[in-house]
Amino acid sequence: MKKHQFTTPFVFEVSSDWGIEISEYMNQKTCAESKEKLIELRKIMDSYIDKGDYFELYSCWVGEEADKREGEITLRINNFDIEQIEMPEKMLVRFEK
């Protein structure tokens, strides 16, 4: 994953029954759970990174780490509307502080 998707030297894997995918094509329950996970991840990472730093999020299935990205977006860690975000799988999301 680090070799193919991220720009930072430090990578941590976070796993759950389903990754963080927010898309109009998702089951509504799973999409709502993804939004909750993203809000919690943002809160946790906000306490770890300093102003001017960032972290990246990439969600994919095991074995698809080297696949082409579907896109990239950059968000301010404390200034985004969760209801306006579209994050399909294989999207690199950069959260800046």
Image: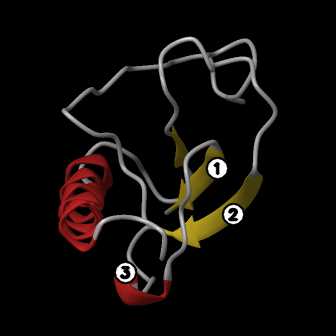
**Residue drawn at the location 63% of the way across and 42% of the way down:** 90
Residue at numbered disc 2: 73
User: Which mark is in front, 1 or 2?
Assistant: 1
The first of marks 3 and 1 along the sequence is 3
Residue 82: numbered disc? 3
Amino acid tagged 1: Met
Looking at the image, tell me whether mark 3 or mark 2 is earlier in sequence order.
2
Query: Considering depth in this image, is 1 or 8 the residue closer to the camera?
Result: 1
Disc 3 + disc 1, Cβ < 8 Å? no
Q: In which quarter of the image is the N terminus?
A: top right
Residue 25: where, in percent of width, then height?
48, 69
The spot of residue 83 in percent (x, y) is: 38, 87
Q: Which residue lies furthest to the right in this view?
A: 68
The residue at 64%/16% (across/down) is 2
Residue 18 horizontal/vertical position (percent):
27, 39
Q: In this view, does 67 lie to the left or right of 28?
A: right
Q: What residue type is labelled 2?
A: Ile
Secondary structure beneath label 2: strand
Vertical relation: 40 (above or below) 54: below
Foreground residue among 44 and 93: 93
Q: Which mark is residue 91?
A: 1
Give residue 36's quadrant in the image: bottom left
Q: How far apart are marks 3 and 2 (CA)?
A: 14 Å
